[in-house]
Image (cartoon, rainbow, N blue to C red):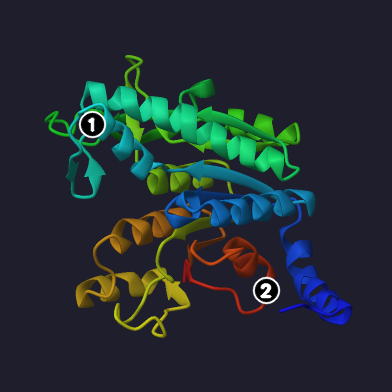
Amino acid sequence: MILTAMEKAEILVEALPYIKEFYGKKVVIKYGGAAMADRVLKNKVMQDIVLMKFVGMHPIVVHGGGPEINNMLRRLGLKVAFENGLRVTDRETMGVVEMVLGGKVNKEIVAGINACGGKAIGISGKDGGLIEARPVDDTGKMGFAGEVHRINPEVVESIIENGYIPVIAPIGTDHKQESYNINADTAAAAIAVAIKADKLVLLTDVPGLLENPEDSESLISVLRVSEVDNYLERGVIAGGMVPKIKCCVESVTGGVGRTHIIDGRIPHSILLEIFTDEGIGTMVVDE
């Protein structure tokens, strides 16, 4: 479909109130899933992020990279294991995680943003003491699978103040300088709270929270924190959606304005959520 000049003008006019509202505001984007694996979708996400920066917003990217890690582990003959959705991370696996996330994936995203006309700097949670971590399991069963203990937002704020887009690999360290692999959703939520972000956007491979998982038309557009327990009891929030909703709840109750779970398989999904009246996905609000 080819848009006329007038239709393009109408689109820009519709976006204007949102550009004005979020000018100078921080938006944390958790990037992963199909939007990372598909070359075309990946380029669309990079374009969205760069456009956000040029209209005066401050995007902060926190990325995953599970499939890339799995591929490398298999190539090296190492075991791929998960427990309750978290990667069992022994010392060898942690080395691979750090190499893939902090090296390959992080720098590919930085290069993609730069190629679209933006300026990005890639870091991990180890840089500047950004993420202080601790093990998720004291028994040692999960190895170096970690959770966020404390966030030092100074390094992120310094990057933003100098006109760059931070791209963050979710790897943290403890007081013994041990490295930990942290779930990207969890890291994004903690960073959003620490930097007092106005929005947290989680890119997923589903339309959002569905009343009926078999019916894509049953999307719950707005989810209030007060409704979460009821949806959990009814099994509406289940499986992989549980940790995502938990991250959203922690973010909005921690001071983040609003959080969004959106379908990263849709081209320009970030722009559709932020800059249009309709929006897409599920918005979680503290009401």
Q: Is residue 194 left or right of residue 17?
A: left
Q: Is residue 192 above or below residue 101?
A: below
Side of 79 relative to 66 (left or right) = left
Q: Quick check: can you spot residue 24?
A: yes
Q: Which residue is mark 1?
A: 89
Of labels 2 and 1, earlier in sequence is 1
Q: Report the front residue among 166 and 194.
A: 166
On screen, residue 198 versus residue 218, left or right, reads right
Real-space CA distance between mark 2 and mark 1, rounded to the nearest whole angstrom:
41 Å
**Residue assigned mark 2:** 276
Q: Quadrant of residue 166?
A: top right
| SS at circle 1 | loop
Residue 198 percent across, percent down from the top left? 61, 55
Q: Residues within 10 Å of mark 2 (few under 14, many from 20)?
A: some
Callout 1 amino acid: Thr
Q: Nearer the viewer, residue 27 or 10?
A: 10
Numbered tag placed on residue 68 in the rendering: none
